[in-house]
């Protein structure tokens, strides 16, 4: 396995600085063994179908490796198995075939310690206040009260929720509820954060700002981040590498290395090479999306049959 | 007090006043129904004589036991049934038509099984009230967002921790509807059982007064039961509001 990952050194260029090369490069979905944080090998997922029909081949075989501290984004057409892939990586679903390794230990049937997951849907507990939501995991872990308070207050401040600590999620906006879920995940200091379309329900402006917050917390925690998204711009803006998946059964069609500087933020979208990168990802994704919705390209183009 | 609450009290007061006027003016024969003020007088007389307490105690003791067991067993039964989809599919038609079954016909069977004591009555209360809790628990769990169950897995919760920390709080609203119904059904089951075969309790006292043409006592006890059940339901509603405070916008 070879590491193909070039990134501008943090501090060497501003947030909107251009990457060293304008043309985005392709790289494999694998990394060097020494920096390996999580790895999927030959992962396949088949879902049982109603009796008499063939099982649905949802995913794979997929080989993927994520480097420690890397920001890896996955885009793909609807129904290509992105969320299934994340569930398998989190230990929430077992692969039909293949192996999943996190920190050199195989994942089997349970979510291993050190992994935090943020979902697209609002996963906050509506019966708890924001403070209690964020403290939930720490209390379950039996952490001492003083330390719990310290950590919860830190993450509430970090996520801009300090003024809403006593509010219930029902009284917050969708974006704020998602921040509660992110804070609840981060307070446990996971070494790998899996995000399943966390900003899918938000408007474009809020998504860009939430992306900035995500980059800020990625830099602050040093955690590995795997982001599933249907938004190409979001993936290209945030990630070190962008994995583009094929239509079902989902596989990696390409992995683009972005080589953005470490201290980037959403202003990178105005960089000319950003357009090149999103254009390249879209050119692959367009074909796959056409396959996914079952149309011929001519139909999509609007020509008469 | 809310506007709806004020209207509710005004409507109830209006109905009671109309009934009072109808009874006092002879529109309703006093041998058929006595005026509400007489009912209140009857309650006061029964309380002074000590009979109200004597008749109420066994009824409320049995209702309390039946209600607590119906809620406890109903929640456990609903949770277990939800985890056994095949069994649930078999039982679904029974649950759907449950209240069409005349369970009071089982009273003699319960007497044979449990003997001549309070347990046949309590069992009637449990079988009558328990299924309301089972059904509301099942409906509640069906509507728990799957993402919350995923969160429970991320926290590596055991099955009991998942029920206690995620499922029960998540189903509090539909469950409370079942609990309120269980209270009403427990009362109905126990009182109806006391009507059929009991030597004590409010149901027995009402039936005894009815047989003896003692309208004043009969209506007094009926009014007392209605007032008490209404107050208990109001108490449950207050608990529900407190529990669900902050959950809705």
Image (tube, coloured by chain):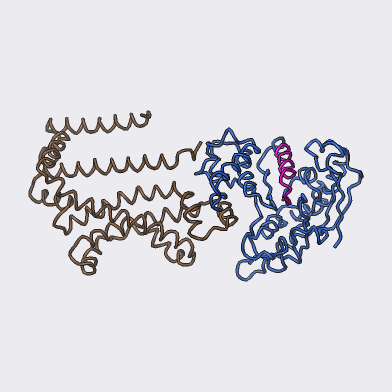
Chain ID for brown? B
Whether residue A75 appears in this view of the structure is no
Whether residue B125 appears in this view of the structure is yes
Q: Please name the residue shown 71% across and 43% down the image.
A: A217
Span highlighted in magenta in the image: A208-226
In the rendered image, the quadrant that contains the N terminus of chain B is top left
Quarter-of-image position of residue B134: bottom left
* Nearer to me, B50 or B104: B50
Quarter-of-image position of residue B132: bottom left
The percent coordinates of residue A174 (x first, y second) are: 61, 39
The percent coordinates of residue B149 (x first, y second) are: 55, 55
Tell me, yes or no, whether the highlighted magenta stretch contains residue A223. Answer: yes
Query: What is the tally of numbered marks visible in this picture?
Result: 0
Chain ID for blue? A
Q: Quick check: B211 left or right of B8?
A: left
Q: Please name the residue shown 70% across and 62% down the image.
A: A58
Q: Quick check: A201 left or right of A219?
A: left
Q: Please name the residue shown 40% across and 47% down the image.
A: B176
């Amino acid at each position: 396995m070879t590491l193909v990952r070039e990134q501008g050194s943090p501090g060497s260029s501003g947030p909107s600085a251009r990457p060293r090369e304008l043309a985005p490069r392709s790289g494999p979905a694998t990394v060097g063994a020494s920096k390996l944080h999580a790895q999927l090998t030959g992962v396949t997922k088949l879902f049982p179908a109603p009796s008499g029909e063939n099982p649905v081949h949802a995913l794979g075989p997929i080989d993927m490796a994520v480097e420690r501290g890397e920001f890896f984004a996955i885009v793909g057409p609807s129904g290509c198995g992105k969320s299934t892939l994340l569930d398998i990586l989190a230990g929430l679903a077992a692969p039909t075939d293949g192996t999943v390794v996190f920190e050199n230990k195989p994942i089997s049937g349970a979510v291993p310690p050190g992994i935090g997951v943020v979902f697209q849907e609002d996963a906050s507990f509506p019966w708890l206040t924001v403070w209690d939501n964020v403290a939930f995991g720490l209390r379950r872990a039996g952490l001492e009260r003083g330390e719990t308070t310290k950590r919860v207050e830190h993450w509430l401040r970090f996520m801009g929720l300090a003024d809403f600590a006593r509010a219930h999620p029902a009284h917050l906006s969708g974006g704020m509820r998602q921040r509660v879920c992110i804070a609840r995940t981060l307070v446990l200091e996971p070494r790998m954060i899996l995000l399943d379309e966390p900003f899918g329900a938000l408007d474009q402006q809020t998504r860009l700002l939430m992306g900035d917050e995500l980059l800020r917390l990625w830099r602050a925690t040093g955690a590995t981040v795997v982001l599933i998204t249907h938004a190409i711009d979001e993936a290209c803006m945030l990630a070190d590498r962008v994995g583009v998946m094929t239509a079902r059964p989902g596989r990696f069609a390409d992995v683009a290395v972005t080589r953005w500087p470490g201290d980037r933020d959403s202003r990178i979208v105005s960089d000319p090479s950003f357009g090149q990168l999103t254009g390249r990802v879209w050119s692959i994704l367009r074909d796959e999306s056409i396959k996914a919705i079952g149309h011929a390209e001519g139909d999509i183009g609007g020509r008469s049959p | 007090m809310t506007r709806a609450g004020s209207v509710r009290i005004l409507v109830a007061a209006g109905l009671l006043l109309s009934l009072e006027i109808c009874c006092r003016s002879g529109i309703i024969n006093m041998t058929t129904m006595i005026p509400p003020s007489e009912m209140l007088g009857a309650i006061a007389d029964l309380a002074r004589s000590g009979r109200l307490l004597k008749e109420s105690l066994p009824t409320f003791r049995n209702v309390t036991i039946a209600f607590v067991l119906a809620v406890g067993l109903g929640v456990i039964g609903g949770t277990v049934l939800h985890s056994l989809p095949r069994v649930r599919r078999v039982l679904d038609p029974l649950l759907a038509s449950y209240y069409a079954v005349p369970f009071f016909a089982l009273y003699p069977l319960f007497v044979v099984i449990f003997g001549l004591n309070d347990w046949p009555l309590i069992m009637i209360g449990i079988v009558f009230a328990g299924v309301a809790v089972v059904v509301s628990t099942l409906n509640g769990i069906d509507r728990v967002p799957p993402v919350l169950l995923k969160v429970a897995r991320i926290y590596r919760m055991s099955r009991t921790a998942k029920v206690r920390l995620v499922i029960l709080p998540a189903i509090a609203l539909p469950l409370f509807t079942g609990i309120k119904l269980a209270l009403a059904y427990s009362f109905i089951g126990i009182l109806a059982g006391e009507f059929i075969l009991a030597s004590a309790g409010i149901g027995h006292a009402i039936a005894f007064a009815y047989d003896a043409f003692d309208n004043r006592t009969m209506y007094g006890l009926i009014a007392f039961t209605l007032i008490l059940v209404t107050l208990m339901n109001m108490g449950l509603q207050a608990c529900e509001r407190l529990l669900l405070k902050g959950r809705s916008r």
